[in-house]
Image (cartoon, coloured by chain):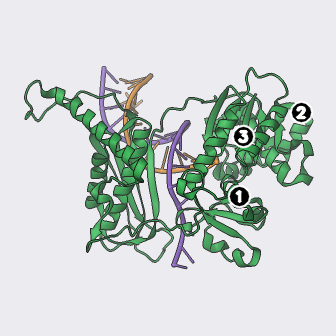
Chain colours: A green, B purple, C orange
Amino acid sequence: MLALVDANNMYVSCERVFSPRLRGRPVVVLSSNDGACIARSNEAKALGVKMAQPWFQVRHLEKTQGLIAVSANFELYGDMSSRMMAIEARYAPRQEIYSIDESFLDFDGVRGDLVALCRDMRAAIWREVGLPTCVGLGPTKTLAKFANHVAKEAERKPGSYPRHLAQVCNVGAIDRPALEELFAATEVGDIWGIGRRISAKLNESGIRTVRELAHSDAAMLRKQFSVVLEKTLLELRGVSCMALDDQPEGRQQILVSRSFGKAVTSIDGIVEAVSEFAARAAEKLRQQGSMASAVNVFFTTSPFRKNDRQHEANVTIPLVRPTADTRHLVGAAAGAVHRLFRPGFSYAKAGVMLMDLQAAGVQQAELDLVGDVEPGSVDTVPAKSSNQAKLMAAMDTLNRRFGRDAVRIASQTAVSNGAETRSWSVRQERRTPRYTTRWAEMPWVKC
DNA sequence: TCTGGGGTCCTAGGACCC
DNA sequence: TCTGGGGTCCTAGGACCC
């Protein structure tokens, strides 16, 4: 039996732990640049605020409905997530951390009343970190996700579901007719793996509810849609098609991108931003013990500004040899900007993606075709790269200890007229303190 | 004025091989 | 008249997730 444990409105709930004034109020958390709503409390959902809705469209609710907005504080959410995941791990032999607020637990071999166990776990998470959660139990990942959906809906709309399904719901314990009824009351788009496009197409074929989907022909779905949808169907019928992955490999690609706080028109500004993103990406790369073989760089104008001339630069640079060295990665990224930049555009966003990742330490021997190296000097390559690794490790240590960018590549901070620019940096006017990860920002308790 | 930032997997089609 | 029959690898694009 699998469980899907997930925090309710994670980011809002994290903020509420430290700001009691946010409890019971409509609250949204804003993306970087305070641009869009990326998390909503139930009260904010009730006001009609949609996921990813631009802030300027709902801003008027501040005055009329008491809506409260805070800037995203990912450092806080990440730390709260680790604490929550550690508690969950105590309750099951295997855990797959699926996202910042969700994990699958595998209770295989655990005996006793799993619903009672999960209620106990919820209480522990609430007591020890202060986050509200819901748990779905089912024989497959898709059914556990569905059960979680029911648990949440039953909590949010007490009238429309049996009371005992709220907060912790085990579809394995629901008899067939009652399950069919739940399926019939749920739209296909609410099922994990069925997004907007597929549900529209399913609706066209007359399949609107989960019940109708569950009774569809598997071969037909595979033919008309994809093997992915066929798996989803089988999982709804209790046939497991997606294994629990409790030992994830490192990422296959690493992306750092941002929208700018205000439009950037100069090449210096783009070089600076792209250098910064490449440096951040390189840090992540070393953290997972990988090297990259290619760097993708893009910068683009805003598609929302219809009157602006549009330009999108995007290029992938293969590297001579895989590297995790910030200097090489920043150099490649900045070089790409110099080749692709066009003056006269208002750029709104940029990013750096590291690709074709491989484990560090797998060093491919090189065939030297240039021939300016003495015979026998092949040995200098590993020696050199080990010095690089030491330098990078020292840089990471210094930056961890003395703050991000204590040591950095010069192009990360363009200098014009002697002043540091960073014109691209994000706006975050409403960010709360990083209560759990910075000594200087710890909450105070008045006695 | 103002529109997020990460990721994964699958498929189709082209280049190329024998 | 009539033009094989397998493969692999790579890439771009589309779908999905939170």
| Residue B16 or residue A40, whichever sits in front | A40
At label 3, the amino acid type is Val
Location of the N terminus of chain A by quadrant is top right
Where A186 falls versus A298 (above or below)? above
Q: What's the residue at 66%, 49% (across, down)? A: A195
The answer to whether residue A186 shows anywhere in this view is yes
Q: Which mark is residue A16?
A: 1
The answer for which chain carries disc 2 is A
| Residue A401 or residue A51, whichever sits in front | A401
Residue A345, image quadrant: bottom left
Closer to the chain start, of discs 3 and 2, is 3
Q: Which mark is residue A5?
A: 3
Q: Percent position (x, y) of residue A46?
A: 78, 64
Q: Which mark is residue A176?
A: 2
Compute the Cα span from label 2 to label 1.
Answer: 39 Å
Nearest to viewer (mark 2 / mark 1) = 1
Q: Percent position (x, y) of residue A232?
A: 69, 36
At label 2, the amino acid type is Arg
Q: Which mark is residue A320?
A: none
With A310 as the anchor, is A321 left or right in this view? left
Label 3 close to label 2 by CB (< 8 Å): no
The answer for which chain carries disc 1 is A
With A445 as the anchor, is A270 left or right in this view? left
Compute the Cα span from label 3 to label 2.
Answer: 24 Å
Q: Secondary structure at mark 1?
A: helix
Disc 1 crowd, CA 10 A, few/some/many (<14, 14-19, 20+): some
Q: Percent position (x, y) of residue A103?
A: 66, 38
The answer for which chain carries disc 3 is A
Q: What's the residue at 41%, 41% (across, down)? A: A285
Q: What's the residue at 88%, 34% (across, down)? A: A174
